[in-house]
Image (spheres, rainbow, N blue to C red):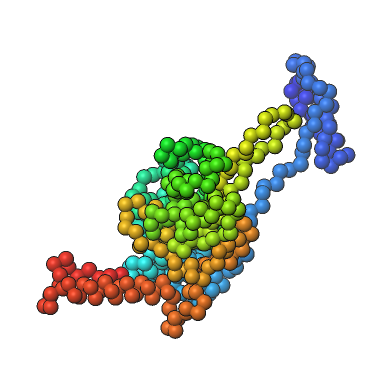
Amino acid sequence: MDTEQTYYITMTFWTSKARAKTGRLATVPFTSKPSKPSTISATTQIDTTPIKPPLQQTSAFLTLPLELIQNIASYLDHSSAASLCLSSRYICYAIGRNDLTEHLSLSCTLPKFQRRKNIEILERAFPSHWYCSWCDTFHRHDVDGGPTRYANETKRDCAEFNSYLHNGQEYIICYHHVRLAVNRVLWGKEYGISVQAFAYDEAAQRRSGKIVLDTSLKCEARVVEGRLILHASFDIKIPSPGSLHSGGLVKSLTPILPHVVAGHRDSHAPHTGMQQCLENVLARGKKSKVQLCSICATDFSIQCGTNQAAPSEPTITLHKPSQPVLKINVWRDLGSGRNPFAASWRAHGELGKGREGFASDALRLASSQPGDIKGAFENGNPRFAAGGPPAGMQRPDGKSFEKSMSESWTQEILQSRAQREPEGGETAGGSDSVE
């Protein structure tokens, strides 16, 4: 018997003997090979416990017989059956793709908005893409993108056409950011971006005329009941306490307010009531109540205090007047991200060179109260406008106000076209139908 066989038999003997005593962990005296002296310690521990693979979670629905799954699918309409078909590969094999094919083929005959809504069920089948209603296509999700990393995203015209919010520099919130954040909460982390991507902290100097002011901006977001709520806090250090009562201070502060804090798409002016609120706070030095913009779904409050930092060690210094700090807090309901044409989203966007007065969300806000959006962000309370008709303003035919307004706009367009058309024919531009 050679040296190698002797070494192997010795190790096997001690391992089996120790396992019989402990049942789990064997402490084996080390016997080195005669030809290779070892400098390892006297004992070596060997864990002989078998490693179990992680348990795979399986839905109880997938354990049903194929016949029962097919029977359940037979009671669903085409839209629900198409969604069920895309839930997993096993379900797709079980019930087939006939309902999905018929659902998509019928969508081609529907009006544009209804067709886009039906196609959205494919979005759950492709976590790496999101559906753009403006382009009527699926765009790839830029993993390295987000409001703070917009420069890393693929440049598309729809990002600007779908409206956006910004701070004037490097923080840009587009429609697809809202959609992806809501998708992640509703469907899973692989479908979008985290709300942490909306976190932003900036300290900068902003110039208004000849005045340079130290400012700071902080943003954070939260999804409540499938809607994205954005909180932005903007601080402005006033140069001297005596300038608080200056009549031109409000006019010099308004231009430096970032769009994400004070802007909306209906006009270049700040939120309704914000300028008057600024004047009252600066004149009286008190905190304002929470107010609601009548144009976009935004709560805001303003307060003016002093920036007094507690010293780390007691020191003797000359008394200096504390520097006043103006703090503006806003809470925006940016909507559910399902439709870029919804007033709940577009009312917040940048107007740019567009015409004023065409992006109000006043109808939906008629049932809202100041503080509802703030409470939704802080407490998760969903008591804010979700798109339903205001109390006492329901239509007798049961139609929603959004649908009725769309129908009325369509009728007005058709009437105006009929007036411009000659009596015996169509206009030179053709006979395009209004969807």
Which residue is most to the bottom?
A: 396
Residue shown at 86%/40% (left/top)?
22
Image quadrant where one finds the N terminus = top right
Using the image as rendered, state which of residue 334 and residue 93 is in the foreground.
Answer: 334
Using the image as rendered, state which of residue 401 and residue 274 is in the foreground.
Answer: 274
Look at the image and tell me whether residue 152 can be seen. no
Residue 426 percent across, percent down from the top left = 15, 72
In the image, is residue 368 above or below residue 311? below
Which residue is most to the right?
A: 21
For this view, does 313 lie left or right of residue 354?
right
Which residue is most to the left?
A: 424
Using the image as rendered, state which of residue 164 and residue 139 is in the foreground.
Answer: 164
In the image, is residue 117 above or below residue 24? below
For this view, does 245 lie left or right of residue 409?
right
Residue shown at 88%/39% (left/top)?
21
The answer to which image quadrant residue 223 occupies is: bottom right
